[in-house]
Image: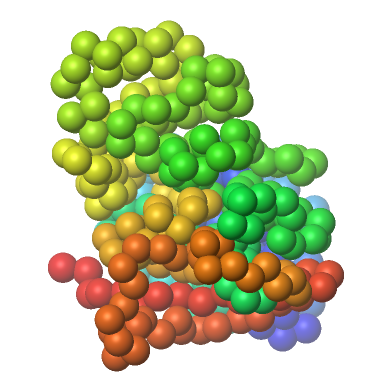
Amino acid sequence: MTPEDYMRRAIELAKRGEGHVSPNPLVGCVVVKDGRVISEACHEHIGEYHAERNALLRCKEDPAGADLYVTLEPCCHYGRTPPCTEIILEKKIRRVYIGAMDVNPLVAGKGAQILRDGGVEVHTGVCEDECHKLAEVFFHYMSTKTPFVVMKYAMSLDGKIACASGDSQWITGEESRRYVHELRKKYSGIMAGIGTVLADDPMLNCRIEEGVDPVRIICDSNLRLPLDSKLVKTARDIPVIDVCTFDALATEEGQARQAALEEAGVEVAPCGHGSVDLKKLMTFLAEERELDGILLEGGGTLNASALKAGIVQKVVAFVGPKLIGGAEAKSPIMGEGAANMAEVPQLQDIAVQRFGDDLCVTGYLPQQEVQ
């Protein structure tokens, strides 16, 4: 097997940590000696050992002289756990192959240099693009101090997300809907608008085996979240953050609604005046709640606002082979829209998957340079 083969195995191992390691990155590790894999592991849970330490502590034999493949540069500082560079040197690993270099200022090249200074042969950039994509949420979160936001929607072949009557179940098939629950497990938060809640009364939870429920965030400018909604009824089991405006809390009625929601276990968080300030909300969610990734499952109005605010990094669009029609039927992105094609952002790094009869198109929005 080649170094790339071992690294791709480490990437697959890393994915086992989805839903459990946020805001840490997904990391996988493979230890190879004399052409044999003698251990492999991932970072399994936040606060527990990292992938390298897990793998080295679980070796079937003495790893001295072995090669270690890891998707992200080994850490070199004390945090929730000891530095991985320490145990790599202690176990006398001969060579370390790194997929992507860390962007955390506490590491950022220092881990690799410590290993080299300790006599370890270090190779970097093995399957770098794949390893970077594996940790894209972490890289964005560390670089911008805001969550990585994925806008997800399902539409018909003629670009509608519901009939004019509002009926939308179901545009896509079971395979697509199952994949959506895998996305809900992957990201630490899920966000929708109050319009979606009032229309559908969704749970916004993860309903697959070994699923992990994301924190549910509702953009609710006027504090209209119904006390008898599924979200409120389950708020003590799965966190709900109801994001309103300061204006909504300026009246006695608003304060009474806040008290009732908080009594039910809902966190009420004012952010902005007139409408929810999505940019400030992203900073709040990252800094105060350590949410590193958000799956945006809003309707056309919230999607348009999110794009206008520039908070979206990635788009996941499901297309069902159905023709809904109707001038009044809503589209995935409402609002004013672009005035001309020159203003329209071009998605990059496009990937197309098939789920049953549905297509899923994934792409990245061009991002502004981090200041």
Q: Residue at x 60, y 50 (%)?
A: 166
Towards the viewer: 16 or 170: 170
Could one spot residue 207 in this view of the protein? yes
Towards the viewer: 325 or 50: 325
Residue 186 pos. (x, y %): 59, 51
337 vs 185, left or right, is left
349 vs 291, left or right, is right
20 vs 322, left or right, is left
Q: Quadrant of the N terminus?
A: bottom right
Q: How many marks?
A: 0
194 vs 93, left or right, is left
Towards the viewer: 261 or 155: 155
**237 to 327, vertically: above or below:** above
Q: Residue at x 67, y 41 (%)?
A: 206
Residue 86 pos. (x, y %): 46, 52
Q: Quadrant of the C terminus?
A: bottom left
- Quadrant for residue 10, please give it: bottom right
Residue 30 pos. (x, y %): 68, 64
Q: How is the image coloured?
A: rainbow
Q: Residue at x 31, y 78 (%)?
A: 338
Q: Residue furthest front?
A: 327
**109 to 192, vertically: above or below:** below
Residue 285 pos. (x, y %): 34, 41
- Quadrant for residue 368, please give it: bottom left
Could one spot residue 131 in this view of the protein? no
Q: Residue at x 48, y 12 (%)?
A: 264
